[in-house]
Amino acid sequence: MTEPGPIDLRGVLCPNNFVYIKLKLEEMAPGDRLEVLLDDGEPMRNVPRSLKEEGHRILKVSPEGEQYRLLIQRGPD
């Protein structure tokens, strides 16, 4: 499974942060993992929900101050 270093999307506004994550996931194989850093607030309300709707799994959410680290597993095609 691919698990690159975290993608830092702090300061990136919705829906751009979701679009960026979605494009990265499309380059990956089903089951691969992606780690991202997101700001609290709107990104944390919208991005996880949108990813789940696309069929991906949020494996871990770790608060780190005013940001969050998410571990995402790419869903099946």
Image (spheres, rainbow, N blue to C red):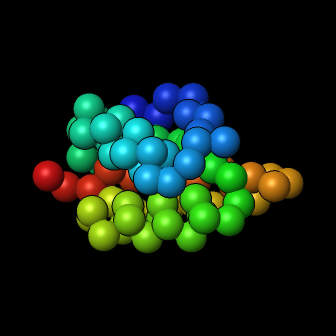
Is residue 59 found left or right of 25 in the rendered image? right
- The percent coordinates of residue 63 (x first, y second) are 75, 59
**Relative to 73, is 9 above or below?**
above
Residue 30 appears anywhere in the view? yes
Residue beneath the point at 30% across and 70% down:
53
Is residue 60 found left or right of 21 in the rendered image? right
Q: Nearer the viewer, residue 36 or 57?
A: 36
Residue beneath the point at 58% across and 59% down:
43
Quadrant assignment for the N terminus: top left
* Residue furthest out toward the left: 77
Q: Nearer the viewer, residue 22 or 77?
A: 22
Q: Nearer the viewer, residue 19 or 64?
A: 19
- The percent coordinates of residue 50 (x first, y second) are 38, 65
Residue 33 appears anywhere in the view? no
Residue beneath the point at 45% across and 45% down:
16
Tell me the quarter of the picture where residue 68 sits. Answer: bottom right
Report the number of discs: 0
Residue beneath the point at 27% across and 62% down:
54
- The percent coordinates of residue 33 (x first, y second) are 42, 44
Is residue 26 found left or right of 69 in the rendered image? left
